Structures are given as structure tokens and as C-alpha cells.
Amino acid sequence: ATRPVTIAITGAGGQIGYALAFRIAAGDLLGPETRVRLRLLEIPQGVRAAEGTALELEDGAFPLLEAVDVTTDAERGFDGVEHALLVGAKPRGPGMTRADLLGDNAAIFVAQGAALNAAADDAVRITVVGNPANTNALIASAHAPDIPASRFSALTRLDHNRGLAQLANAVDARVDELDGFAVWGNHSASMFPDVSRTTARGDRVTGILGARLGGPDGVREWLVDTFIPRVANRGAEIIEARGSSSAASAANATIDHVRDWSLGSTGTTSAAVRSDGAYGIPAGVFASFPVHAIDGEWVVQEGFEPDAFARDRIDASAAELVAERDAVRALGLL
Ligand code: NAX
């Protein structure tokens, strides 16, 4: 057997952490050959829940699970980790503004960036799930000067998977028959799910949809009135149905993201990575792009040609990311 890999989950006492830990213990992240050690990082209010999760993990008798440690100490939690899944964040409470939320979370990710810088393995890959995920990744990366910014990415795979599933339904295909779909921008209602390059069994979905919906105008109407809002509002739809926010699907998307990052992706997917200015998205912010993963690196896919419709939406989402960055800067945290 290969050597074990140490993985930290922050917010491990929360609902996404609960779903995530069992998938990882079962081998869904790094495959059936790789033993794992889990570090469950929490704040004092969440530590009992994380301890409960650790007890249940033990009761899973997972052959691949070598160790589970629960801690409130970030440097201990991140010591020697090759993957850090930053899920823990402060949710928006009653009366809190978006700026309050940004400030409280910025403080968390300043501290966690520094702790990762001090303690993580040289090969660490850091996936930010906790919201505002893109800007939290920017903050953590800025406070981890010894870790290349390319080792940080934020989760937009849930938006991606939501879009993929809706699109597969719309063209009567299986999700694995689609390629070239991507989500751009911020993980927020402004994200832009882009079907312009998507194919189903090799045929452009815009063509398939156009044949059913009366040509390009019909497709545009469906995108604006049905598809984009359905993806953007899916989180609210889940809360309405389930009585709490998406958890297992968020954990599943996190698994997909990290597994692809580590082991390579098949075809195009979406992840928020530090922009180098590609596609006109201001350099430095963490934005979702069409990507694939090769040799443990996210590579922004070339060859997309956003039209005016796409451009407006990508620019609007990028502007939101710039505004979040500027707000954090104004707090002196960047
Ligand atoms: P929960 O409130 O169930 O769990 C969050 C946990 O994080 C709590 O147990 C809390 O004690 C802990 N925590 C808070 N601050 C911490 C810190 N500094 N260090 C360690 N732990 C800390 O939320 P859950 O539903 O699990 O969602 C977690 C985060 O994921 C939220 O910010 C949520 O908005 C975000 N999401 C992001 C998604 C994405 O696609 N990027 C999708 C799903 C989800 O909404």
C-alpha cells in the first residue's frame, strides 16, 4: 500500500463536514489504494459535534482510515496536511450586512492562511468551500506567502454540477455524455453557467436546443428565463425543500473538485482559481473559469470566445469579486 495522506477538514462539525468525512474515509477522494488520516478542525462551539463525527467514523470501520484527530488549534490541524478543505465559515446571522459577513470571514481566513503557511506539507492543496469562497481563497492565499497561489482554489463545482444536471435533462443526455460546460465568476447568484461550448455526444447543445426551441432566440430565452435562474437559485430551492442548505451535494462537489485536482480531470470542469488576467477577468481575484486538471495543476482552458451576452455576465460577476476584494482591502486584511 502507498503511504497515507493527511487531510484537514475545517468546520468538520457542520453539515457539509459531516457528509464529507465519510466520503473521504470510504476512499472516494483519493481512490481505494490510498489510506487517509483526517484532521477535523473546529471552533469551541463546534468541537463536540466534530467529536461525535469522529466516533461515528470509528464505527464505520473504514479500512482506509488510519487516524482521526479533532482539534481547535489550526496549526495542529494543518500540520503536514496535503489537502486542506476549508469548509468552516461564519454564516450570515440576522441583521448582518454582507460587509459584516465579509469582515468576520476575512478574519478566519487570515488566520487559516497563516497557519497553513506555517504547518502544511510542501505539496499542500487548499480548497475553499466556506463563503464567500472566492474571496476567502484570496485572503488565505495572501496570508500564506510560502505557498504558491496556484495551490489555492475555491469551489464552484457545485454550481457546475447543478448546471450539468439541468442541461443533461434538457437535451436528454447523460451527464457523462456532456463536455465543454463551464461556470464563470463568483460563487454567488452572479455566476454565469456557459453552454456555448457544451457538446452532448459530440453535438453542440445550442444546436440541439435550438431545434426544439425555435432557433437561437428560443435558446437565449430558455437560458435567461429558465436555465440560468434555476442554477443560480438552486441553493434556495434546496433550503425550501429540505429545510436546510445543501450539504451532501456540496460535499460531493468538493470530492469531485479535489479528486480531479489531484488525479486529473476528464474534459472541462469549473474551479475558481487565481486569475492571471485571462479572458479579461482582473488579475489577482479568484474567479471560476473553465479548467481542466493536469499533473496536479488547474489549467484554464483556452478557446472559449465569450459573445456579448456572455461578456456582460462574466464582467458583472468579476466586478463583484473586485468589489469584495476592495472591501477586504479597506478593512486592512489584504
Ligand atoms: P454549518 O454551519 O453546518 O457548518 C459550519 C461549521 O464551521 C460549524 O460547525 C462552525 O462551528 C465551523 N466553523 C466556523 N468557523 C470556523 C473556524 N474558524 N474554524 C473551524 N471551523 C469553523 O455550515 P455548512 O452547511 O457545513 O456550510 C459550510 C460553508 O460552506 C458555509 O460558508 C456555506 O455558505 C458554504 N457553502 C459553499 C458552497 C460552495 O459551492 N462553495 C456550497 C455549499 C455551502 O453553502
Image (cartoon, grey):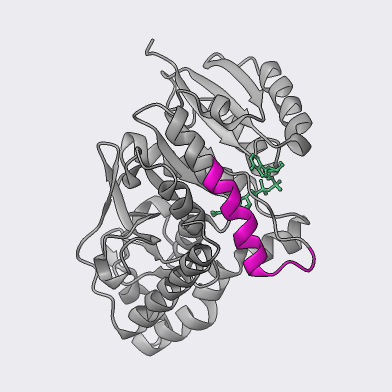
> Which portion, as a residue range, is magenta?
94-111
Q: Count the marks.
A: 0
Q: Which of 177 and 44 is in front in this view?
A: 44
Q: In which quarter of the image is the N terminus?
A: top left
Q: Is residue 57 left or right of residue 332?
A: right
Give the percent coordinates (x, y) of residue 107. Answer: 59, 51
Which residue lies most toward the left here? Answer: 303
Q: Is residue 32 left or right of residue 280?
A: right
Q: Which of 125 and 216 is in front in this view?
A: 125
Asked if residue 199 lies in the magenta stretch, the reply is: no
Residue at 67% over, 64% down = 100
Q: Quadrant of residue 238?
A: bottom right
Q: Which of 13 and 246 is in front in this view?
A: 13
Q: In which quarter of the image is residue 99?
A: bottom right
Give the percent coordinates (x, y) of residue 143. Answer: 44, 46
Give the percent coordinates (x, y) of residue 79. Answer: 49, 24
Q: Overall secondary structure of the magenta stretch? A: helix
Residue 215 showing in the rendered view:
no
